[in-house]
Image (tube, grey):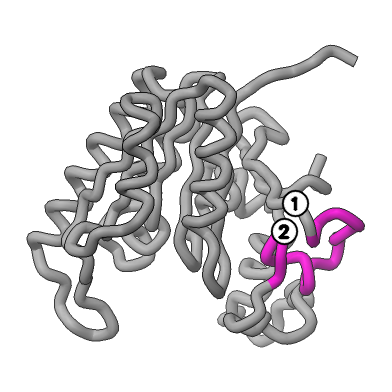
């Protein structure tokens, strides 16, 4: 079997801690293998973190940039336009970094929060991920990754042929206006995992109807299963 090499798209999401730490671990391995790494922290900025000092030893091979102010008003409060502007600037730099091919690994730290807070449109991110250079790796971190990040496809294709179990469950649970219409039974059983003790590997695996051995250990990469249709699930062909 031929040795196929390509850049991966990895989404570190789910409850609990460890998403940025996992990305840092991957980054250190990448630098150790001679790759260049850029981490853009979308919301962090007001505090000094230990990783900022740790990566200085790697020089230009591992660069971390804090792009935010550290706190974002959410939960009913109006988002500060300055925070939105900083996120837009961070995304502009991220897009350029990904498409330039100058970096082997680009980490978009806490970008899922920026999307979830509606400070950044997910469609912009998806469009860039689709046209990234073949050998560039991208990691996106933060809770509650937008469904379009987990499964990427044109709207008509996504609704007609959802492939990821999470997407299927979301669409199956949408209320039907016509009481005479039949719909698929929701595919998700069980309870939402505890944020104190989140699952390892694919965060959806405890409730996934097609989970197999290994899903609890490995976070699947986003891959193209049909032209223009990308799914982060190892069991989807």
User: Is residue 141 highlighted in magenta?
Assistant: no
Determine whether, in the image, residue 60 is placed left or right of residue 45: right
Q: Main secondary structure of the magenta part?
A: loop
Tag 1 and tag 2, C-beta contact below 8 Å: yes
Task: Answer with mark 1 or mark 2, whichever residue precedes in sequence.
Answer: 2
Q: What element carries label 2?
A: loop
**What residue is rendered at 43% in x and 42% in y?**
107
**What residue is rendered at 57% in x and 41% in y?**
26
Q: What range is drawn magenta here?
A: 199-216
> Quarter of the image holding residue 97?
top left
Q: Is residue 151 visible?
A: yes
Per the image, the residue denoted by label 2 is 201
Q: Residue 218 carries which label?
A: 1
Residue farthest top in this picture: 2
Few, some or many C-alpha atoms within 10 Å of disc 1 (few <14, some 14-19, many ≥20)? few
Residue 42, percent from left and from top:
29, 53
Determine whether, in the image, residue 144 is placed left or right of residue 68: right
User: Is residue 210 highlighted in magenta?
Assistant: yes
Relative vertical location of residue 189 with respect to residue 61 in this rendering, above or below: below
Determine whether, in the image, residue 173 is placed left or right of residue 96: right
């Amino acid at each position: 079997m031929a040795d196929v090499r390509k850049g991966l798209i990895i989404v570190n999401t789910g409850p609990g801690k460890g998403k940025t730490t996992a990305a840092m671990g991957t980054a250190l391995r990448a630098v150790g293998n001679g790759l260049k790494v850029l981490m853009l922290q979308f919301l962090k900025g007001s505090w000094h973190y230990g990783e900022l000092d740790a990566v200085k030893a790697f020089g230009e091979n591992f660069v971390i940039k804090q792009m935010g102010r550290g706190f974002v008003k959410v939960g009913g409060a109006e988002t500060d336009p300055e925070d939105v502007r900083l996120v837009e600037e961070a995304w502009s730099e991220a897009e350029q970094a990904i498409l330039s091919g100058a970096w082997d690994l680009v980490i978009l730290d806490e970008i899922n929060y920026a999307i979830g807070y509606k400070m950044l449109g997910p469609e912009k991110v998806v469009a860039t991920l689709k046209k990234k250079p073949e050998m560039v790796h991208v990691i996106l971190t933060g809770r509650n990754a937008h469904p379009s990040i987990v499964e990427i496809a044109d709207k008509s294709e996504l609704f007609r042929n959802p492939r990821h179990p999470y997407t299927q469950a979301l669409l199956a649970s949408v209320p039907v206006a016509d009481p005479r219409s039949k719909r698929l039974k929701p595919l998700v059983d069980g309870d939402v995992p505890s944020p104190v003790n989140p699952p390892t590997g694919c965060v959806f695996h405890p409730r996934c109807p097609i989970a197999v051995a290994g899903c609890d250990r490995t976070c699947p990469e986003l891959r193209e299963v049909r032209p223009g249709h990308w799914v982060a699930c190892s069991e989807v062909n």
